[in-house]
Image: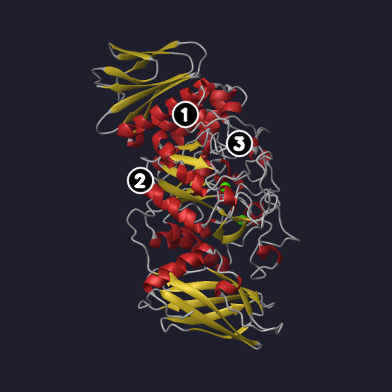
Amino acid sequence: MHPLRRASTHAVVLSWVIAAGLLSDASCARAQDNTDPNAPVVQKVEPPNWWVKLTPEVMVLLSGRNLRATRAECNLPEVSVSRTQSTANGDYLFLWLKLAPTLKSGIAVCRITTASGQTTFELPFAARKQILGRNQGLSPDDVIYLIMPDRFANGDPTNDEPAEFPGSHDRAQPRAYHGGDLRGIQAHLPYLKDLGVTTLWLTPILKNGAPTDYHGYGAVDLYAVDPHFGTIGDYQELMGAAHKQHMKILFDVVPNHVGPLHPWVKDPPTSDWFHGSAAQHLSSSLPVKGDFYGQTGTKKPTNDLFEALVDPHTPEAFRRNLTEGWFFGVLPDLNTENPLVIDYLIQNSIWWAEASGLDGYRIDTFPYVPRAFWSQWHQELRRLYPRLSTIGEVFHPDPTVTSFYAGGRKGWDGIDTQLTTVFDFPVYFALRDTLLNGAPLGRLPGILRQDSLYPHPEFLVPFFANHDTTRFASASGANLGKEEVAFGLTLTLRGIPEIYYGDEIGMTGGEDPDNRHDFPGGWIEDQQNAFRRDGRTTEQQKIFEYVQTLLRLRREHESLREGKLWHLAADDSSYVFMRQSEEERLVIAVHNGANARTMKVPLKDTPLQGTSGIAPLFGGAQADLGGDQLKLILPPLSLSIFVLQ
Ligand SMILES: [Ca+2]
Ligand SMILES: [Ca+2]
């Protein structure tokens, strides 16, 4: 292959190179045809390609054998090797390549010389794409829809059981791969557009290793799409199709850990690549328990004691398990203080942003990674993609904990994570507690009053379910009416709401993996197709229309997206609030009781003052303005919206 192959042929080569995934074995890394067992061999190049005019330097990690280089050089004068570092066993070689501003797209061929011979590898450089319509970021105009790609729709039955994963596909097994994929999602973009969501969060699409890794959280290759889900080409096509329909996509990134089967676990690129090793490591559970902070026993085991991380008084020993332990005692914890690991992960996130055009990152297990890492990761990403949104998972019911991780200001540790926002787990817990477990509805304003802790509460992501929670419809105490109110609140409170796939048709399911059933109709052999109106049951259609209508109202009413939120009244069973924009004022009245009730809301010295009329917009409540009060008659278990004049 001529090293200076350029331009038109380059695009073809590059797409082929990327489609191949890893640039593995002979496709690009060209070991000499040499039977010498000491000869250098490159099996993998990370990143597999890069872009011109993107960064002044790129760090390349080669995997293979006998890579203790004495010399390394590339054929392009614009690409110079400034430094190398190999592992003692010769299985890895880091190279730092300086890229001159005059570098044009093409393929660099780099030669490595060791005491026992030579080999080469190729690194294609492409021109950057137009940024318009890519890497967009989110605003409160958006609504997120969470999809597990394996469980949504099967658009390509030929990838259901890739040759390298025999026995991994079985729709009858809840922890096996079911065949859903990226093409299936693309085929259902019209359904999602019709529902009214704007942004897709896909659980991780990276290549995983175990036959039960359908969920995607066990990566074995940070530069490859899992073959069950498709190819990088499929991901790019999905992204392009979504962007064309003015939809956005979030990439689920997991810098805290890799899967237990990642080749690094047996053979790390440096001795301190992980916190500990497979043989010896901390568990992520803390030595101190909830009673340390006076908590009384009802916390779920999924809530780790992040209090200890946000508390300025805890010694290092109270924190180390959370930030350095292996998640669930199993998932290999990356040493995110190691500059090589940091650079690898930052480059990896830049690569996915550039290769795909993704609009933001949903960040897994956010508190388990030290905050200094997040600050640096964001800084490097935002330098290139200033609009990217990032949403951190801080699985905790207390806003004093979750808000500590939101970016926009420094914490007591002097660090600004620069994270755009966090998922609103406190609202999640409050919605479940109030609607299902009999807690007073006033718990909600009790959470919302703590918005003052966040630099940007308008970006918070309220939700009532995700892939780690039971389906709302199957939770104890749930019914269709309660689920509608849960949707109603999620879609009318401040922030950027998130909906879990299938909840819009009231899908049922208990704990993981029962909460991850296949969307009915995503498979050609399915008896029912709930993607179509004529395939939905009466009950499914009722909740679908409820959600669809609220999403339409969100689009039509700026105040529901951007408006200021005012509390008007709250007690055990009801909560009345306003969303106010420059253009309009809407009143949202929620009643969680089993019987209708009347509520009287005083107007004086509230944002209701001066109201001359009130008209129903959504729901079955009645409203009357009389004297200096607003009288509301609220049906049992209901959410209603009124427009004020
Ligand atoms: Ca498939
Ligand atoms: Ca960690």
Q: Earlier in the sequence, mark 2 or mark 1?
A: 2
Q: Earlier in the sequence, mark 1 or mark 3?
A: 1
Q: Are marks 2 and 3 in contact (CB under 8 Å)?
A: no
Q: Are marks 2 and 1 in contact (CB under 8 Å)?
A: no
> At 23% from the left edge and 18% from the top edge, which residue is drawn?
612
Name the amino acid type tagged 3.
Answer: His
> At 34% from the left edge and 17% from the top edge, which residue is drawn?
602
Q: Earlier in the sequence, mark 2 or mark 3?
A: 2
- Element carrying mark 1: helix
**Residue at numbered disc 2:** 246
**Left or right placement of residue 537 versus residue 305 in this view:** left
Residue 407, image x, y percentages: 44, 51
Name the one closer to the observer, 607 or 96.
96
Up/down of 172 relative to 362, above or below: above
Residue 137, image x, y percentages: 39, 50
Q: Could you say which quadrant of the image residue 207 lies in? A: bottom right
Name the one closer to the observer, 375 or 35.
35
Q: Quote the CA–CA distance across marks 1 and 3.
A: 20 Å
> At 43% from the left edge and 25% from the top edge, which residue is drawn?
546
Q: Quote the CA–CA distance across marks 2 and 1.
A: 23 Å
Q: Could you say which quadrant of the image residue 30 lies in? A: bottom right
**Left or right placement of residue 484 versus residue 333 in this view:** left
Up/down of 53 relative to 396, above or below: below
**Residue at numbered disc 1:** 487
Q: Residues within 10 Å of mark 1 (few under 14, many from 20)?
A: many
- Element carrying mark 3: loop
> At 35% from the left edge and 23% from the top edge, which residue is drawn?
587
Q: Quote the CA–CA distance across marks 2 and 3.
A: 28 Å
Name the amino acid type tagged 1.
Answer: Phe
**Tag nearer the camera, 1 or 3:** 3
